[in-house]
Every structure is written in C-alpha cells, then in structure tokens.
Image (cartoon, helix red, strand yellow):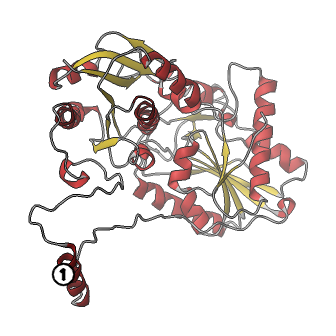
Amino acid sequence: MKKAVVYLNQFFGQIGGEDVADHAPEIREEKVGAAMLYNQLLDAEVTHTVICGDNFMGSRTEEAVETILDFLKDVDFDIFFAGPAFQAGRYGMACGEIGKAVKEEFDVPVISSMNIENPGVEVFKKDIYIFPGGHSAAKMRDDVKKITDFGNKILNGEKLLPAEKEGYYKRGIRHQYFLEDETPAYERAIDMLLKKINGEEFESELPIPELDLVEIAPAIEDLSKTTIALVTSGGIVPVDNPDKIQSASATRWGKYDISAMDKLDNREDLAFKTIHAGYDPAAADADPNVVVPVDAMRKYEKEGRIGKLHDYFYSTVGTGTTQKEAARMGKEIAQELQDANVQAVILTST
Amino acid sequence: MVKEIEKAGFTVVQMANLIPVAKTVGANRMVPTISIPYPLGDPSTSKEEQWELRYHRVGVALDALTTEIEEQKVFDVEI
C-alpha cells in the first residue's frame, strides 16, 4: 500500500490555539486530527502527521522547513498533503512553504487546499497543487475529499487533465497535449481572430498573468518637515472598541487620537488593546506599542528626525478580511490622510 | 490597504513579519518585523531590549521612506 504524510498546524494537529502558535515542528508516527479523515478517503495509508505552529513557520521559516525535511529524510512516502488551510493566511503560507520544500527535496506530489482569499494561493500555486477551499473548518470534509480524490488519481496512475478540468488553481505550467476533437491550432487561431474582429468574447490559450503593482511613490526628501501617520491591520483599539471593529473579516476601521500621548498605554491601564482574533493578544495587550510604535515615533519626533507624528492612528483587523474590503478601507483611510495633510505612512501588520 | 494608500500618492512603508505576503500583495517598501503577535518587541526579552529593537526598526522604516527605489525592496535590519 502507498504511503502518505499529512502536515497540520497547531490547531488542527490538536495542540491548541493561538497561545501555542509558536509550537516547534514535530512528527508523529500516527494519524492526528484531520489526518484520520485523510486516511479514510485515501487509497494510501497516512503513516505520519507533521505538526507545526503557524507562527513558528511564519517567523522561523528556514529552521522549521529544515527540521521537517530532516524528520522526513527517513520516512518512506509517496504523497504529501498540507492543510486544508481555508482562509487562514498564516496556515496557508505555512502549507505552501513546507509543501514547496517537500516537493523540491523528495519530488513527491504535494497537494493542499485554500480559500481563494488565502495569500498562500498567490504565493505558492505555481509550486504545488492547491485546490479552492471553503472559508472555515466547516468545509473540512468537502475540502479534504476534493484533494484526496485528486491524490488518488495520482496514486493510481490515472491520466491528469489541465488545471481547469481537475479544479486546482492554475499553476501557469504549459503542457503539450492533443485536444479531444483534434481541432488544429491554425483553425483555433482563425476562430479567435474572427471573434476578436467581430467584437465577440474569446478565450486566449496563452493567458498573460496580470501583475497589479502600484507605481512606487517618490522618496521623502526631508523627513524633518514631514507628517507621518501610523496605520495598522493589527487590531489595536481603545479598550471599549468604540467603532465595534470586528475581530475577523473586518469591514470597519477606526481612527484614534494620540496627540497627547507619548506612548500607547495598555489594556491594564484601560487604554488600548487588540481585538485581532488571528494572533495571541497577550503581548499586544501588555504593550500595544509593539504593534503601533507610538513611543518610537514620538522619540524620533522629539529628536527632530521627523516633522510630526500625525494626531491619529488608524486601525482595522487584517484576518479573514477580503481583499475587496481591505482595498475599500485603504481608500477611505487614504482620503482621511489626504484631508489631514499627511505625507507619509508607516503601516504595521501582524 | 498598503496599495491603496500608495495609489493615493503617499510614500508608505509596510512593517510586516510575513514579507512574502507583503510582496505578493504589492507593497513596495518593506521592513521585516520579528513576529506576528509582537512585531516590534519580544516580551520574553527585557523592556530595554524591546525598546532598542523597536526604535531601530522604526528608524529603518524612516530610512525606507527617504530612499528612492526602482522596484519592491525589503530593507535590512540590524537587530
């Protein structure tokens, strides 16, 4: 029987929640958590489960990847699964990082599942098979079914179809193959040309990936005459969260007056805390300046290195937040900054 | 967010732990932070160490704002 290894984060590996997101990588010769579901659905046996905390993988990537590759050196396996990561950004990035490394090191098929909004999709879809997944663990069964079905096809040596047919995110890899109806290229090209001339829709066979980069703003010439604003997606708000910003999938943002403050006081002082549900709040609650560095900016202001720290900082929560909402909030905040004559921004994200 | 702010014409620097994500999203000036839950000060170190790290990295962010760049750039930090 063929053998599979499954990678899970601290949560799905049943270690715990955000408080143990720093959990160091480990490997177990058993099926932990979601690995059992994989085992039921696969035409292979899941022999090992690899578990690593999302923050460990995010912050100490090289160390995590090396450790895990080292674990796997002596393991005999035919296929590797990571996730599903749903809309969890750090988990998606972790699945991509380890998946890519396993693919390169051991040359086995690597399959994962992520929601389209997961940043891991854009970064890693070229490196491993990633299937579209649900927003949350409610879709666990569906998402695992999708990737194990595809895994079984590979394990059983069945013919694999292009990304659109199999359902995974396009990797941008071109294969040479014959169409079922054998329409030759010149006919397809003429058809497309005619459609184009007639103003009809057509689908190119060589899509050019869109790169949406923003024009780089010019450098600031003289910081000592510049007003700089702090913006964060780390969810720092006054303890009563007056704007009722959501802890995840935020659609709201707030601006908070810091004109009379040398630093951000903490939760215990009933000043500021974080409402971000995507990371352990202990450190940010104890000292919000680790997320919104008001204290350091004030020091630079006093030293004359910057002209002025803007009287308000702007805050929202960047977990599960869709790109569309983030873009809208960004635009709204930019408008505020323009009206306030701010010239530069430091944006901190968690 | 960082993109919309830059689109509006502001010189902006993103301080983030997941630099690959910041790059993919399209930030142009980036400064790495040390972790997700405590980007600018590790609570297991002394207050002084945390302050030094934060003061240094925010300083790098200020340098980034005054640096002309041709393409996306991650600025180096020393502590």
Task: Identify the residue at image location x=28%, y=32%.
Answer: A137
For disc 1, the marked residue is A191
Looking at the rendered structure, the kind of residue marked 1 is Asp
Task: Identify the residue at image location x=33%, y=28%.
Answer: A80
Q: Position of residue A253 (x, y in %)?
A: 51, 51
Given residues A22 and A199, the one toward you in this image is A199
Image quadrant in which you'd find residue A200:
bottom left
Q: Which chain is indicated by disc 1? A: A
Q: Quadrant of the N terminus of chain A?
A: top left
Q: Provide the secondary structure element on which disc 1 rests.
A: helix
Given residues A180 and A60, the one toward you in this image is A180
Task: Identify the residue at image location x=32%, y=57%.
Answer: A174
Question: Is residue A159 shown above or below A189?
Answer: above
Label total for image: 1
Q: Is residue A101 visible?
A: yes
Q: Is residue A262 visible?
A: no
Question: From this viewpoint, which residue is outermost toward the right?
Answer: A303
